[in-house]
Image: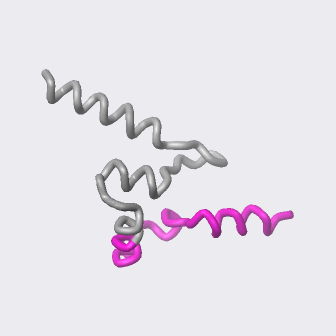
Amino acid sequence: MKQMRNASLESVHIDSAIYLVRGERIILDSDLAKIYGIPTFRLNEAVKRNRNRFPHDALTSQIAMSNKGLSGV
C-alpha cells in the first residue's frame, strides 16, 4: 500500500512539471533532472551524447524557441 501511495505522489509531481506552451507539452530540463535526482548539467551532457535517440524536433533549447518566436515579428 505504501509503495502504491509513493507511485501516485510521484505521478502528481511529474504532472505538475509538464507545461503546455503553444499547444505543445513540455518539461524543463531542470524539472526532469530533479525527477531523476541528478544535476541539470549532467542531464544536458547525457542528452548531447545521445541526440540520435531523440526525435529531431524534441530537443529545443529556450534560446532556439525564443529566436524562433521572434523570427515571425
- Quadrant of image for the C terminus: bottom right
Q: Residue furthest front?
A: 39
Residue at horizontal 34 percent and vertical 71 percent from the top: 46
User: Is 51 included in the stretch rendered in magenta?
Assistant: yes
Q: Residue 62 location, x and y as percent?
A: 60, 63
Q: How many marks?
A: 0
**Where's the N terminus, which quadrant?**
top left
* Type of colouring: one colour
| Above or below 11: residue 51 | below
Name the residue rendered at 50%, 66% in the picture.
59
Q: Quadrant of residue 14?
A: top left
Q: Is 58 covered by the magenta stretch?
A: yes
Residue 22, image x, y percentages: 66, 48
Residue depicted at x 15% and y 24%:
2
- Residue 13 in the figure: left or right of residue 72: left
Relative to the observer, which residue lies in front, 28 or 41? 41
Magenta span covers which residues? 45-73
| Location of residue 12 in the rendering, given as x and y in whole percent from the top left corner | 38, 31
Quick one: 41 or 49, which is closer to the camera? 41
Examine the image and state in which quarter residue 50 appears: bottom left
Relative to 55, is 27 above or below?
Answer: above
Nearer to the camera, 64 or 30: 30
Residue at the location (38% across, 36% down)?
13
- In the figure, residue 68 lies in which quadrant? bottom right
